[in-house]
Amino acid sequence: MATFEKRGDSQWRAKVRKKGFPTITKTFANKAIAERWARYVESSMDKGITIDHREADQTTLSDLLDRYEREVLPTKKSQTSVKFQIKIIKKMIGHHSLSRLNSSIIAKFRDNRAKDVTGETTRKDLLLIRRVIHAAIVDWGIQLPNGNPVAAIRLPTPSKARERRLEPGEEEKLLKAANESGGNLYNIIVLAIETAMRRGEIMNMKWCDINFDKNTLYIDETKTDSPRTIPLSKKAIEVLNTKVRNIDGFIWNMKPDSITQAFRRICKKVEIEGLRFHDLRHEATSRLFEKGFNIMEVSSITGHKDLKMLKRYTHLKAEDLVHRLQ
């Protein structure tokens, strides 16, 4: 049975005793949380499950995030942004032990974080915490008295999908400025618009993956871990034929972040606002639909596994569809 003892103005100690099990004691901020924990422990004991929260007591969220960064993150494609998220989370709530981490603490983190960043950024931080705690429970066998606290709070509403496409004249301005700046940016922009490839996929292109007889490109490393072969347009082939082959086999000698920075510079130079490099993938995908490709054909080219996600990219221009109604 469970007993509860008030200790000070804001502490309640819960103690659960049951024959055949060790006595478990834990202190909480209020009685309601203590009672909820006691019911969970008693239920687990009734099922014959031994509850041992010692590891959760001795492990902080910072410890858990460090382990995730050390053991799990190296297997992921996107690491830099996640490392930054980890740093922020550790600074704000990393000192809490896993046994004391509850929905109230997570909700407070959500509200404080939302004061400084967008709802989408806050949402991504919360989802990271949820993934890390899930790994602790499922993969590392750490039993948390409150379960996964992120599951008990309301997440910020996902941001509205971007609908930015190239406006009349913007493509010409971009290409002219990129051509004048020299380097590879001109060819990369053309290739992005012609193929709908992601930035990372473009950077990982190798000469050995191109079949110039069939005008196709094999993409081995993708965001979804699903390799695919895509067709290359006449314009894409022309761009590739202008390149001198490197000894290392890679087509481009630029880092993904370098592309983003160079793209921002030329957008600023020609006074194009609100355009990101990833919007070129959006533009290219929409153009495929405007050319008459069906959703499965577009998916095979762009690599979208979730057709609902693909639909978000297909903002067809109404003026370009008028002729179909005549």
Image (cartoon, grey):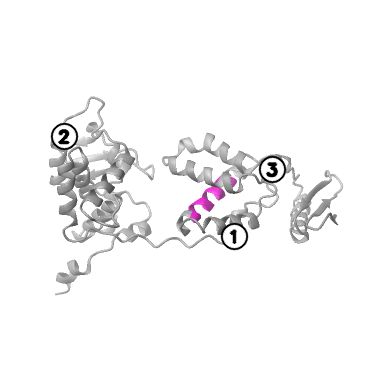
Quick one: quadrant of the C terminus?
bottom left
Q: Secondary structure at mark 3?
A: helix
In front of the other: 270 or 19: 270
- Where residue 111 sits: x, y (%)? 56, 59
**Magenta includes 129?**
yes
Q: Give me the C-alpha separation between circle 3 and circle 1.
A: 21 Å
Picture residue at 65% right of the left edge, 58% below the top: 104
The residue type indicated by label 3 comes to: Ala
Disc 3 residue crowd, few under 14, some 14–19, many 20+, Cα 10 Å = many
- Determine whether label 3 and label 1 are within 8 Å by CB: no
Q: Which residues are magenta?
A: 122-133
Judged from this view, the residue extending furthest toward the top is 247
Q: Which residue is mark 3?
A: 56
Picture residue at 18% right of the left edge, 66% below the top: 320
Q: Secondary structure at mark 1?
A: loop
Picture residue at 26% right of the left edge, 33% below the top: 253
**Magenta segment, prevailing SS (helix, strand or loop):** helix
Q: Which residue is mark 1?
A: 153
- Where residue 10 sits: x, y (%)? 78, 57
Residue 215, quarter of picture? top left
Q: Give me the C-alpha separation between circle 3 and circle 2.
A: 56 Å
Q: Which residue is mark 2?
A: 243
The residue type indicated by label 1 comes to: Ile
